Image (cartoon, coloured by chain):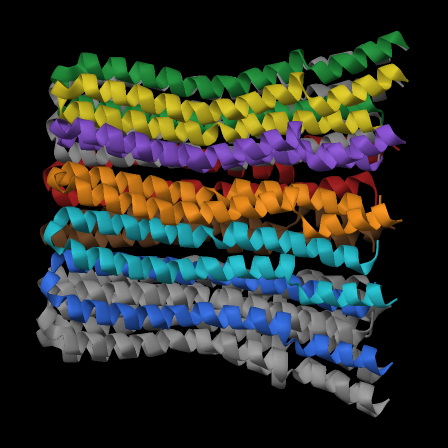
Chain colours: E blue, F cyan, G orange, H purple, I brown, J yellow, K red, L green
Amino acid sequence: MDSMTYIAMISIIIAGITTGFGTMAPALAEGRSVSAALAALAQQPDASATITRTLFVGLAMIESTAIYCFVVSMILLFANPFWNYYLAQAAGQ
Amino acid sequence: MDSMTYIAMISIIIAGITTGFGTMAPALAEGRSVSAALAALAQQPDASATITRTLFVGLAMIESTAIYCFVVSMILLFANPFWNYYLAQAAGQ
Amino acid sequence: MDSMTYIAMISIIIAGITTGFGTMAPALAEGRSVSAALAALAQQPDASATITRTLFVGLAMIESTAIYCFVVSMILLFANPFWNYYLAQAAGQ
Amino acid sequence: MDSMTYIAMISIIIAGITTGFGTMAPALAEGRSVSAALAALAQQPDASATITRTLFVGLAMIESTAIYCFVVSMILLFANPFWNYYLAQAAGQ
Amino acid sequence: MDSMTYIAMISIIIAGITTGFGTMAPALAEGRSVSAALAALAQQPDASATITRTLFVGLAMIESTAIYCFVVSMILLFANPFWNYYLAQAAGQ
Amino acid sequence: MDSMTYIAMISIIIAGITTGFGTMAPALAEGRSVSAALAALAQQPDASATITRTLFVGLAMIESTAIYCFVVSMILLFANPFWNYYLAQAAGQ
Amino acid sequence: MDSMTYIAMISIIIAGITTGFGTMAPALAEGRSVSAALAALAQQPDASATITRTLFVGLAMIESTAIYCFVVSMILLFANPFWNYYLAQAAGQ
Amino acid sequence: MDSMTYIAMISIIIAGITTGFGTMAPALAEGRSVSAALAALAQQPDASATITRTLFVGLAMIESTAIYCFVVSMILLFANPFWNYYLAQAAGQ
Amino acid sequence: MDSMTYIAMISIIIAGITTGFGTMAPALAEGRSVSAALAALAQQPDASATITRTLFVGLAMIESTAIYCFVVSMILLFANPFWNYYLAQAAGQ
Amino acid sequence: MDSMTYIAMISIIIAGITTGFGTMAPALAEGRSVSAALAALAQQPDASATITRTLFVGLAMIESTAIYCFVVSMILLFANPFWNYYLAQAAGQ
Amino acid sequence: MDSMTYIAMISIIIAGITTGFGTMAPALAEGRSVSAALAALAQQPDASATITRTLFVGLAMIESTAIYCFVVSMILLFANPFWNYYLAQAAGQ
Amino acid sequence: MDSMTYIAMISIIIAGITTGFGTMAPALAEGRSVSAALAALAQQPDASATITRTLFVGLAMIESTAIYCFVVSMILLFANPFWNYYLAQAAGQ
Amino acid sequence: MDSMTYIAMISIIIAGITTGFGTMAPALAEGRSVSAALAALAQQPDASATITRTLFVGLAMIESTAIYCFVVSMILLFANPFWNYYLAQAAGQ
Amino acid sequence: MDSMTYIAMISIIIAGITTGFGTMAPALAEGRSVSAALAALAQQPDASATITRTLFVGLAMIESTAIYCFVVSMILLFANPFWNYYLAQAAGQ
């Protein structure tokens, strides 16, 4: 088994783990925020405009951490600098 | 055992783990949101329109993280760039 | 032990784990939602129509993550692209 | 030890684990739902019809995830495609 | 050590683990349900008929998951298809 | 070390673990039920007949899961089908 | 190292673990029951006869699971069927 | 390293672990019971006789599980049947 | 496998883990902050200006720790000093 | 490395672990009891005699489990029967 | 693989882990502080000046622990004394 | 590597672990006790004499378990009977 | 790989872990203290001087444990007595 | 690799772990105590003298466990009896 295979295997493993585990916390945090928003709406229906606006800003912030993870996964799968180096090596042989 | 077999094995493992574990947190978060929505409905039945609308937007946001995981699994199973590279290698031999 | 055996073993393992562990969180989340619905019904029996409708939509969303896991398991057992490749290899020998 | 033995061993292990661990969460979720139903009955005895109906629908949904796990175990024990393939190989030798 | 021994060892291990761990969650869930029933009885003694009926239906549902595990253990110990196959092999030698 | 020794060792290990760990959850669940019964008695002493009857039915259900585990341990120690097979093999040699 | 030594070692290990870990949950459950009894006594001193009677029945049930574990340990140390078999083998040599 | 050394090592390890871990749960349970007794005394000082009597019975029951563990440790250190067997073997050589 | 491959593999692994796990806590912390902000808005709608300003400052502080992790990942993937050293070594050979 | 060294190493390890981990639970339990005593004193200062007496009896019971662990450690370090056996062996050589 | 490679690999691993895990607790602690500040603002809007000042001092203290971790990571990546020693060794050869 | 080195290594490891982990629980328990004392002081300032006296007795009891651990560590570092035995052996050679 | 490399590797690993993990608890503890201070300010704004003074003393005490960890890391990186010994050995060769 | 290197490595590892993990619990306990003190101050500002005095005594007691750990680390780094023995051995060669 040569170096390329190791790089490919590691890239697959880490791409999956980064997305699979890295989206856990954002999902839980969004669930918490949505719950709080619903409880707030039930308590103070008149402030629904402020509440939903704050909720969306918060969800966007939280989603950003999930997107960092997804971006790292996509980089590892489709724009992996180490894989490209070895591809170039293999092509240049 | 050649490189292709390793790539295949790793892809199967990670595809399963990414979906199997990555959908845990969204499921829990959706369960929390639905619970909060039901409690909110019980407390303030008149605001049901706002509550269900906020709930659906929230569920969509949370579901998105589950879908990231499912997308990574599907990429690994059916559009795996590393597997395709080795298939091309094997075909070109 | 040849490559096919490894692929078969890994597919069995991951199919079981993905379903066995991946349905945990949906089950817990559904339990939470049903609990919340029952508490909501006890608190506000007049809103039972809205509550059960919201509950069923929520359960459907949560069940979807369990179904992602079950689908991945079924793909691994009965429509596994890597296994099919090796079957074709073995048949073409 | 030949390939068949590995397949058999793995199938036994995964069949047991999938059922043994995969039924944990449904059991806990059903326990939670039943508890909530009993608390709801104690609080609002007049709504017992709606409560028990909602409970049974919820239990059915939760039980479905336990049944997914049991189905995967039964498939692995009695309708295992990989085992059948090797049986056919062994018979065709 | 031949294949039969491995199959026997694995069957024993998994039979024990499936029952030993798989009955944990049902036991806890039944404990929770019984607790809720007792609290409900203390709160609303007049509804004892409805409460105990709902409790027994719930306990039966929860016990079913424990029985799935026990069934899988018994299958592995006394009706194990893989063990039978190797017994037939050994007898046919 | 021959096959019989392995079977004996595994049987001892699993017999101990199944009882040692499998009785944890029933013990905790019974503790919870008894606690709830005592709290219920303190709250509603007049309903002591119904409460203790429900408690004993519940304890019996929960104890049943502990007994499943104990039964599996006893089967493994004193009526182990795999051990008997090898004993018969050894006697028939 | 012969088979007897392995059997002896495993028996010691499992005897210790079964008692050491298997008595954890009963101890905690009894602690919980006693706490609940004391709280009940403080709340309803007039019902002390019913409370202590229910407590003792409950403690007996819980202690039974600890005794299952202790019994298995004693069987492994002093009436171990596998050890006896090998002793008989060694004596008969 | 001969069999006696293994038996000695395993006995030391298990004697320590059984006491070290097996006394954890009783200690916690006793702490909980004492706390409950103190809270009960603060709430109902007139019932101190009943409370302390119930507490001491409960502590005795809980301490019994700790003593099971200590007994097993002492058996392993000073009355170990397996060690005695090997001592007799060594003496009889 | 030469040194460069090890460096590449380790860099991929750590880049994924640092982002995947390092963004968990910030996501949860942001979810908590947003929840608290929503609850505060529901309780005191008049102070919405102060609340949202404090929320945004807090989110920025928390996001900074997620960004530390993302920065380390990016350094490891695209500006890795150790990889560059070995690239220079390889080029200078 | 001879048998004595193994016995010495294992004795050191287990002596440390038994005391280090076995005193955790008593410490926590004593902390809980003291907290409860302080809360009880704050609530019912007139019952301070009964409270402190009950506290000291309880602390003595809990400390006893810590002392079991310390005793086992001291036995292992200074009165270890297995070590003494090998010392006698070595001296008698 | 020579010593330099080991040093490089270890430095990458520890740099990632120190930042990735070491920033978890500060993030959670800041989330808690911000939540408490928001709750305090909602409860006592008039004290907003004192509250936000105390919050910022507290956030700075907490952030300092995250910065310790980031500093250690940066030292390991860009000012690693051990790496420098080996670089000097390699240059001086 | 000779026996002395193993004894030295094991002694260092266990000395560190026993103190490092064994002081965790006492620290937490003391924190809990101090918290309870402060809450009690705030609730009943007049009973400060009784409260602080009870607190100091409790802290002394808890500290004693930490001191057991520290004593074992010091014994292992400076009065280790096994190390002394091997020193005497080495000196007597 | 010679001794120096091992010492260097271990020093890097432990320096990172000590800071990365050792600052977790102080960060959480500071977050808790700041939260309590903010809640106290909201409840009793008039006592802000005493509260902030007590908070700062407390934060200093807590920060001291984080600084112990940082100091140990710095000693390991820049004033490591074992590394210095080997450096002197290497220089003196 | 000779004995000295092992001793040095183990000393570094344990010095780091003892400080890094052993200061966790004191930090958390101090955070809890400070929180309780702040809550007590907010509730009873008049008792601030007693509260802060009790807090400082408590913090000193808790800090003492952290200092035990730090002392063990410093002994291992700078006054390690085993290292000194081997240094003397090496010097005396």
Which x, y percent locates residue F21?
52, 51
Which x, y percent locates residue G15?
61, 43
Q: How many marks?
A: 0
Asked whether residue K57 is in view, the answer is no
Return the residue found at the far front.
G92
Please tell me which residue lies in front, G81 or F66: G81
Q: What residue do we see at 67% from left, 56% from top?
A: F11
Q: What residue do we see at 74% from left, 22% from top?
A: J83
Residue G45 horizontal side relative to residue J81, left or right: left
Please tell me which residue lies in front, H35 or J89: J89
Asked whether residue F69 is in view, the answer is yes
- Does F70 appear above or below G29? below
Q: What residue do we see at 20% from left, 56% from top?
A: F51
Please tell me which residue lies in front, K42 or L44: L44
Which x, y percent locates residue E59?
33, 68
Which x, y percent locates residue K20?
53, 46
Residue L38 horizontal side relative to residue I92, left or right: left
Quadrant of the snapshot with the N terminus of chain G: top right
- Does J51 appear above or below I18? above
Q: What residue do we see at 22% from left, 47% from top?
A: F38
Residue E9 horizontal side relative to residue I14, left or right: right
Residue K33 horizontal side relative to residue I69, left or right: left
